[in-house]
Amino acid sequence: MHVLWQVRGVDARQWPRPLVPDTTEKMLDDVRVVARTAPHERLVRDWALVLMAVGIECAVERHGDGWDLVVDPLDAERAAEALAAYEAETPVRTPAPVPREDYGRTWAGVVMAILLVAAARVAGPLATGSRLFQAGEARAEAILGGEPWRVVTALTLHTDVSHLVSNLASGALVATALCMIVGPGVGAWLLLASGAAGNWITAFVHGTAHRAVGASTAIFGGIGALVGLSIVRRRRRAWVPLAAGLALLGLLGTSEKSDLLAHFFGFATGVAGGLGTAPLPTLRSRPAQLGLALLALAAVGGCWWLAIEHIPRR
């Protein structure tokens, strides 16, 4: 169906209010030409206003998914010149990219904190010297010697209560912020992958005689993922989130007992993960997100199963 508006004689100050169809007057001659076609109504109205300003009669007509600007054949050449002059004097406006919709509210940070507390209760702190703690800690020589699962199990262990509490507070905040953007399933894998990668690269760099535990490597991986996501979305000021992330790394990740290399490598791999995830559409399916989260939990459980299986029998 075509919708035709008469624009002759309309006061420019009233533009771009919808024009009422004029049924008492023939709008244009039966023979008419399309001067321009626009994808949306606002643009074709701007063109019509330009032609009206120079005294060219025209009409706006809806045609399928587009909008046509039609003129009398005798005015076609003048209309083309007027519109070309208008466009030459008007800077081209690049439409702003449509922001990607975030996943929304999630309890991922709280769940992560509960799981860390449970792991701490089972394995105990460093001082107890439990066999579980020894089997799960990130020992560089063991990781490089055929026990790669330690890069995951070490993320669930903490040296003492203060170490655990500090990671619970920061981890819950970071995990919640990340999972509210990409969803709990995708967020869980970003945290787990960046934390495990950070531990593995650290073990490779140190070679031997290096031990580490704690969720902080995964937490800095989450901060890095947030930075990567922000870099892609901000574009023009990509250095701002990167600088903020590095500032957090320097502020929170360089204390006396902190493993700076692990924090840095976790952060760096997290940035890479965020950059890779940002262009993808948000996974809106809650069952799919839950499935991914359970798979991440199963991966941690599988790594612990391997660790327990390799505990020396007495």
Image (cartoon, rainbow, N blue to C red):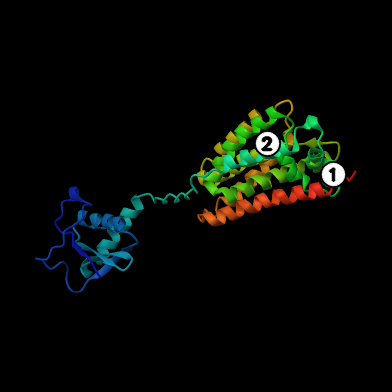
- Callout 1: SS: helix
Q: Which residue is mark 2?
A: 216
Q: Residue 185, which numbered label?
A: none
Q: Amino acid at mark 1?
A: Ala
**Looking at the image, residue 235 lies above or below residue 295:** above
- Callout 2: SS: helix
- Residue 129's spot in the image, x, y percent? 82, 33
Q: How many marks?
A: 2
The residue most toward the right is 314
Q: Please tell me which residue lies in front, 98 or 291.
A: 291
Left or right: 105, with 44 as reference point? right
**Looking at the image, residue 221 lies above or below residue 126:** below
Q: Please tell me which residue lies in front, 204 or 85.
A: 204
**Looking at the image, residue 101 lies above or below residue 167:** below
Q: Which residue is mark 1?
A: 142
Q: Please tell me which residue lies in front, 97 or 124.
A: 124
What residue do we see at 59% from left, 44% from top?
228
Q: Amino acid at mark 2?
A: Ser
* Crowdedness near tag 2: few (<14), some (14–19) or many (≥20) residues, C-alpha within 10 Å: many
The residue most toward the bottom is 31
* Crowdedness near tag 1: few (<14), some (14–19) or many (≥20) residues, C-alpha within 10 Å: many
Residue 242 showing in the rendered view: no
State the separation of the CA atoms marked 2 and 1: 21 Å
Name which of mark 2 and mark 1 comes first in the sequence: 1
- Residue 70's spot in the image, x, y percent? 24, 66
What residue do we see at 73% from left, 37% from top?
157
